[in-house]
Image (cartoon, rainbow, N blue to C red):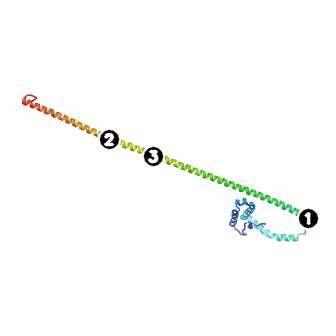
């Protein structure tokens, strides 16, 4: 019986951590690229995996250790049995050899068939893993593309919002400028109106003053004339001297 410890290159008292480390080292050595180039190593990797599976399971490991102990004592028993067994007649030997050959051929054929099936399963699993990796990469690429598109859409939306904000601010500034200009023109017009009103008031006052002066002058003239007429009447008896 082949020892699982020898397959992994470990001592009989190896702990589970050492077994996992040996399995990891073997898997890192027999990569997919290596197995594609060297398919004959697939059996070696499978035997390493089987050995690790046995040793990592306490019940299977205990049974494996018992088988190893039993196989270590079998040769002496077999030798005693062979030594004590009677010699086989010569005419039975060809039949035994033929049966043995048939059994060996059948075992070899069965073994090769199983190995081919296992290899096919390994290749199918590798192909499935490869497809899964391709699907994951495709999904990751799609996610990255969607992320980039979302970022671009967000940047466009932010740019559009900034542009709209600038447009509104510009419109508000323009309206404020128009309002300030309109207010300044209104104030200017109001000042001009007040100035015109003041000028008209002064001109009207001047005209009134002139008119009043003329009226006063005419009244004074009439008074003076009446006074002269009165003097003429008093002195000369007639209104005109």
Give whichever of 56, 205 is nearer the camera.
205
Residue at 36% in and 43% down: 184
Residue 169: image x %, image y %? Answer: 45, 47
In the picture of the structure, the residue carrying the numbered disc 1 is: 92
Closer to the camera: disc 1 or disc 2?
A: 2
> Is 29 positioned to the left or the right of 151 in the image?
right
Q: Residue furthest left?
A: 235
Characterize the local packing of mark 1: few (<14), some (14-19) or many (20 or more) Cα atoms within 10 angstroms. few
Could you tell me which secondary element the residue under label 1 belongs to?
A: helix
Q: Is residue 22 left or right of residue 100?
A: left
Mark 3: which secondary structure?
Answer: helix
Instruction: Give the class, few, some or many, for how many residues have Cα within 10 Å of label 2's Cα (few <14, many ≥20).
Output: few
Circle 1/circle 3 CB separation < 8 Å: no
Label 1 vs 2, first from the N-terminus = 1
What residue is disc 3 on?
A: 170
Query: Which quadrant: the N terminus?
Result: bottom right
How crowded pointer 3 is (Cα within 10 Å; few <14, some 14-19, many 20+) is rated as few
Q: Nearer the viewer, residue 50 or 76?
A: 50
Instruction: Return the residue at label 2.
Output: 192
Residue 17: x %, y % from top left: 68, 66
Question: Which is nearer the eye, 82 or 190?
Answer: 190
Q: Which mark is residue 157?
A: none
Query: Cα distance, mark 3 to mark 2?
Result: 32 Å
Of all residues shown, which one is farthest toward the front?
A: 37
Q: Earlier in the sequence, mark 1 or mark 3?
A: 1
Could you tell me how far apart the alpha carbons at marks 1 and 3 are, in whole angstroms?
114 Å
Quadrant (top left/top right/bottom left/bottom right) for the C terminus: top left
| Secondary structure category for the residue under label 2 | helix
Which picture quadrant has residue 209? Answer: top left
Residue found at x 91% / y 64%: 92
Q: Nearer the viewer, mark 1 or mark 3?
A: 3
Earlier sequence position, callout 3 versus callout 2: 3
């Amino acid at each position: 019986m082949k020892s699982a410890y020898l397959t992994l290159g470990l001592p009989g008292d190896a702990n589970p951590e050492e077994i996992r480390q040996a399995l990891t080292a073997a898997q890192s050595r027999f990569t997919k690229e290596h197995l594609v180039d060297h398919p004959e190593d697939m059996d070696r990797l499978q035997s390493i995996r089987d050995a690790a599976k046995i040793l990592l399971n306490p019940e299977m490991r205990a049974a494996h250790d018992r088988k190893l102990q039993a196989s270590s004592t079998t040769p002496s028993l077999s030798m005693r049995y062979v030594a004590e067994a009677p010699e086989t007649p010569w005419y039975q030997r060809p039949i035994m050899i033929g049966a043995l050959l048939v059994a060996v051929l059948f075992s070899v054929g069965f073994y090769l068939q199983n190995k081919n099936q296992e290899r096919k399963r390994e290749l199918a699993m590798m192909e499935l893993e490869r497809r899964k990796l391709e699907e994951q990469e495709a999904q990751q690429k799609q996610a990255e593309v969607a992320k980039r598109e979302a970022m671009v859409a967000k940047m466009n939306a932010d740019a559009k919002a900034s542009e709209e904000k600038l447009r509104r601010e510009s419109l508000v500034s323009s309206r404020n400028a128009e309002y300030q200009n309109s207010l300044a023109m209104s104030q200017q017009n109001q000042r001009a109106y007040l100035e015109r009103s003041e000028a008209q008031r002064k001109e009207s006052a001047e005209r009134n003053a002139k008119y009043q002066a003329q009226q006063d002058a005419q009244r004074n003239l009439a008074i003076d004339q009446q006074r002269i007429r009165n003097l003429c009447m008093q002195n000369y008896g007639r209104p005109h001297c």
